[in-house]
Amino acid sequence: MRQQAAKSRSSGLAAMVLAMAMPVTASEYKPLRFEEDWRASCNKIAPKCWRIGEAATLIFGADARVRTEYLRPLDFGIGSPGSDNFTLFRGLMHGDLRVGKHVQAFVQLGAYDETGRAGGPVSTDQSRPELQQGFLAWNGDMFSLRVGRQEMTLGTSRLVSVREGPNIRLAFDGVRASWSRGSHRIDGFAFRPVLNRPGAFDDSANKSQAFYGLYATLAPERIAPLKVDLYWLGYERDQGSFAAAQGREHRHSFGTRLFGSAKGWDWNYEAVFQSGHVGDQTIHAWTVSSDTGFTFTNVPWSPRLNLKADIASGDKNPNDGRLGTFNALYPNPTYLSEAALLAPGNIMDLNPALTVKPIPSLKLVLGWDFLWKHHKEDAVYTPPAPLVVIPETIGTDRYIGDQIRLESTYRLSPQWEMRAAAVHFRAGEALTQAGGRSVTFLMTSLAFRW
């Protein structure tokens, strides 16, 4: 009886400690964990937060995810008629040291594994313990500076993303400086992406690529619902490969984004023009994207209807010395769907979708995406980032196909999240003329944050 009582007290104490360590709402977690600041809650989350004297605080955190994927056939069946069924494992742990009001030192370690992938792991699947992030920062009231290895997203992650779908998230080595005042912010940065290697603590900056630029977010008071992003992004790599050009790539992207919400409406419009050169060809590429939605807040399940419409330019004439294929740089590979079948180059799409929330913790999305080549003479492109040519599709018809997607997100608690997705892609003439077939994709994931 005494042993049972002791076990009961021990279990109750462990539950109390665990509950104290957990935040109350999911919004206290950020997609970039170094942006969280738990210092004001240290007395409530003692197992997570240590006081070091009167001026310093050390905060710990962790992330874990298991994701399974099924895909049939591979590469639209063009040369790869088989299927793939694999599981990805991700574990991350971080320590966030805050000294005084402004100084921050952040270290995040990660370990990654996969099992079952046809042909073995790809470069973003597997790594022994590795430094995912590690930087020193000064976070002033208006000015901040971050030096070292760090993750970054810009805007809606259409051009620069942490790459959440794949197992290993994208990080950069370099420096980022920011100025902010109210809702206005300007960022300048100079980076090289981290090159993933499978060994322990052997990742390094990818010297074959460079990424730098300026990114500003403005919120004019006279048009309060509307916010504006203005940016210039410079991109270099030793070897770019497109249907109409190969060689050293030096590309500049000049873009703007208009976004906001009011009275149930939300909108996000973006336009980018690119110049530069690939090999001996000059670049004249562009993209325009839009996402317009309306949420019926007074209707059960709060349905949101939206329409996405995108164009990422392609190349019309491979012999005119000008490359028209858009390069999305470091994009979110799941921008079109969780299946990540296509990359944003030489593509047009219309994507109506319905989002509902039967309960606050459950979100369901049903979408139907119709896709075409921008120019018939160019190819269909696929991930990994930024894009990969399917050479058999050069010159095939324009209609790529359509995909129906059903995605769900269920948050069991602020720490636990379950996700699932089913996608059926029906191949169009751009693929079938190259020997392509329709594709079925299934995904489940379970993620934990602390």
Image (cartoon, rainbow, N blue to C red):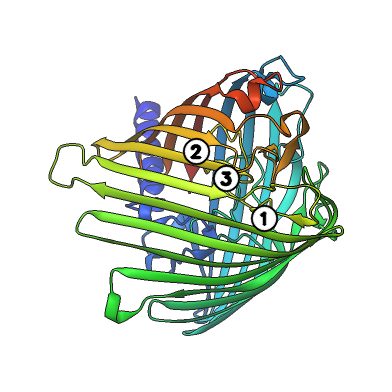
In the rendered image, residue 317, in percent from the top left (x then y), is placed at 74, 47
Seen at 70% across and 21% down, the residue is: 116
Front residue of this view, candidates 229 and 420: 229
Front residue of this view, candidates 289 and 178: 289
Picture quarter containing residue 357?
A: top left
User: Which secondary structure, mark 2?
Assistant: strand
Q: Nearer the viewer, mark 3 or mark 2?
A: 3
Front residue of this view, candidates 289 and 154: 289
Seen at 42% across and 71% down, the residue is: 228
- Amino acid type indicated by mark 3: Glu
Q: Which residue is mark 1?
A: 329
Picture quarter containing residue 360?
A: top left
Q: Nearer the viewer, mark 2 or mark 1?
A: 1
User: Which secondary structure, mark 3?
Assistant: loop
Q: Is residue 76 visible?
A: yes
Seen at 36% across and 60% down, the residue is: 44
Crowd around label 1: few <14 · some 14–19 · many ≥20 (10 Å): many
Q: Which residue is mark 2?
A: 447
Q: Upstream in the sequence, badge 3 or badge 2? A: 3
Mark sitting on residue 164 = 3
